[in-house]
Image (cartoon, helix red, strand yellow):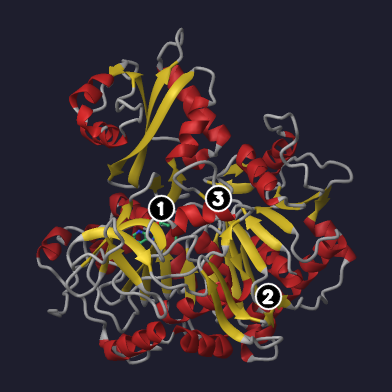
Amino acid sequence: MSSKPAKPSATSKNISSLLQEKRVFPPPSEFSARAHLKSMAGYRKLWKESVTRPESFWGKQARQELQWQRPFKKVLQWKEPFARWFVGGQLNVSANCLDRWLGTATANKAALIWEGEPATDGKPGEERVLTYAQLHREVCRFANVLKRQGIGRGDRVLLYLPMIPEAAIAMLACTRIGAVHSVVFGGFSAQSVADRIQDSGARLVVTADGGYRRGAVVPLKKNVDEALVLQGPDGERLAKSVEKVVVVRRCGNEVHMAEGRDLWWHRELEYVTPVCPAARMDSEAPLFILYTSGSTGKPKGILHSTAGYLLGAKLTSKYVFDLRDEDVYWCTADVGWVTGHSYIVYGPLANGATAVMYEGAPNWPEADRFWRIIEKYRVSILYTAPTAIRAFMKWGDEWPKKHDLSSLRLLGSVGEPINPEAWMWYHSVIGGGRCPIVDTWWQTETGSIMISPLPGVTPTKPGTATLPFFGILPEVVDDQGRRVPKGSGGKLVVRKPWPSMLRGIWGDPKRFKEVYWSEVKGSYFTGDGCRCDEDGYFWIVGRIDDVLNVAGHRIGTAEIESALVSHPSVAEAAVVGRPDELKGQALVCFVTLKSGQKASADLKNTLRNHIGKEIGPVAKPDEIRFAEALPKTRSGKIMRRLLKQVASGVEIRGDTTTLEDLSVLAKLSAAED
Ligand code: WTA
């Protein structure tokens, strides 16, 4: 591998010329000098050990990194596909994130630095800083509020909150008493909230009167009110398991408070003390459920458990972000996604780090919001998504140039493949050419980062997540499950169990086996396509199932199709992705109408809003196209491959209401059957 040092440019103008040469970016030596791990040889040795003797590796890490209330007896019990890690051990996640720092110098260090969205009148956003000691106190108080409402071990609590410290407090409070949280992203609708309550059987919901987004109030409490009365096809209320709703006062907008059911967060705090012992939880006690889209049906409740998840989040945060005591670390994800769970809350806090949390959008009120925050708090590590990076590129170099970004020392990327142009821009314009980039591949299911460079150690190349983390054995295989030669593409699988892997799909062990453990015998199937290059670096190509990745958000085509056909004017629908410069993929819907229904621009709007209502604004499609018929094989299967080509290749016509006759395409490629 050649390792010519890159000469970074300070503008985006010559990025394509920088990319002409196949560059490898060696780890900057000033970085390596202080990194947790210092050399590639060190990485290779430790990785080899970790996959040849995984139990000894993970056992040692678990003893070293976590505080146990009772030591575990056995590292792993593996009965494919069910894993039990650190069997017999007991510990508490909130104690590992908070109590362990009390009585140390970290107690009075900022745990969370929160910045609210700036107000519409130009006033700066609010600011709140919680030290470890303060966060501990708030978590204990809210844990007592939950207890007072009868919530305890194993009970599910649904969190539907904006990006405010209360989101982290509520998560940690659940873990303190052994309750299982399920965070739902604020961009999901009342219907999605109701579906998740029904599936998880949540007894309590924590929400806010509203959250700010680009100057508007997102009516979270109103959505919860709606969710609580929605009925299923059998006429039963979907959310009948909910007994109480705790509401954070955030925006001060008017909300309805149902007597006996709804409680104000700040009022409830008046009844409790700040003393709450951490429950002793078994290693395998369920920790949280997080819903994510799959290729079929409704979203799946991905279940994570206590010890393994925490170890994964902690260890990867420590090594991949090379966390140091003086760092100010900022992950821009929302806590509604797994990245927010592992890399805003659990990973950084378990390491005693200072994490920034920001409520608003990257371009509100202006396109320099991120750079302003970095300058203001002297952020040293930034972890964000390629979609955001591409948007910043488009908005222009002048925005970052207005700010002093010299505090940055490390950049991270997550959620979707990062194209080399965006990588180079991130590297040169944001990182000033001095910051290593960690392109981290992982999934809701994996709990923590699986493939990523280690900064200061791994030479990087724009566009690849490079090499596996310790204890992780990924492989690219063909349809028969055989490893493909270097340079060829195939399915990405993971050969060995790892501590932070999902423990199942909530309430559906059969689906768990089918989705993840049936595609390639004896391995975990990721759903991603991948290629391994001559250096053994993994290049993720993207999803090979019917899951789309739109702006770094996972969206199942099946969910959107079923939302569409639930509308009275729709007969059939097929949803595909098309490449999009900004979002990675855009969502294109092909729809046939019931007889008597007329295609119109109005109907398109109605259907978009219908999807917004059924799933949430996050799933609103980029394009809806009406068709006379959908191309199908002789056995009646919709030819998605063909539709994908149509979606990416054919220009959108000016007259948006014309019916396209796509069935003719099916005749042309009847060979597909
Ligand atoms: C994609 C987000 C390429 C991938 C943490 C995966 C990536 C899905 C990367 C999981 C990356 C995530 N490079 N693709 N660095 N990171 N992905 O569950 O397709 O929301 O399967 O977890 O995002 O999305 P999820």
Which one is earlier in the sequence, the residue at label 3 or at label 2? 2
Residue on which disc 3 sits = 300
Which one is earlier in the sequence, the residue at label 2 or at label 1? 2
Residue on which disc 2 sits = 94
Q: CA distance from mark 1 to mark 3?
A: 18 Å
Q: CA distance from mark 3 to mark 2?
A: 26 Å
Instruction: Specify few, some or many for label 2: CA neighbours under 10 Å numbering under 14, 14-19, or 20 or more.
Output: many
Q: Residue furthest top?
A: 596
Residue at image position (49%, 63%) is 339
Judge whether 240 appears above or below 308 on screen: above
Expressed as whole percent of the image width and height from the top left, the position of residue 509 reads 58, 56
Residue on which disc 1 sits = 552
Residue at image position (29%, 43%) is 580
Residue at image position (71%, 32%) is 231
Mark 3, mark 2: which one is toward the viewer? 3
Confirm or reject: label 1 Cβ below 8 Å from ligand 1: yes
Judge whether 501 appears above or below 97 on screen: above
Query: Which one is nearer the viewer's eye here, 14 or 451?
Result: 451
In this rendering, the count of numbered labels is 3
Type of amino acid at the residue the image marks with label 2: Ser
Mark 2 in CB contact with mark 1 (< 8 angstroms): no
Expressed as whole percent of the image width and height from the top left, the position of residue 630 reads 33, 23
Mark 3 in CB contact with mark 2 (< 8 angstroms): no
Which element carries disc 1, helix, strand or loop? loop
Type of amino acid at the residue the image marks with label 3: Lys
Type of amino acid at the residue the image marks with label 1: Gly
Residue at image position (75%, 75%) is 137
Q: Is 369 on the left-hand or right-hand side of 3? A: right
Which element carries disc 2, helix, strand or loop? helix
Which element carries disc 3, helix, strand or loop? strand
Judge whether 334 appears above or below 45 on screen: above
Which one is earlier in the sequence, the residue at label 1 or at label 3? 3
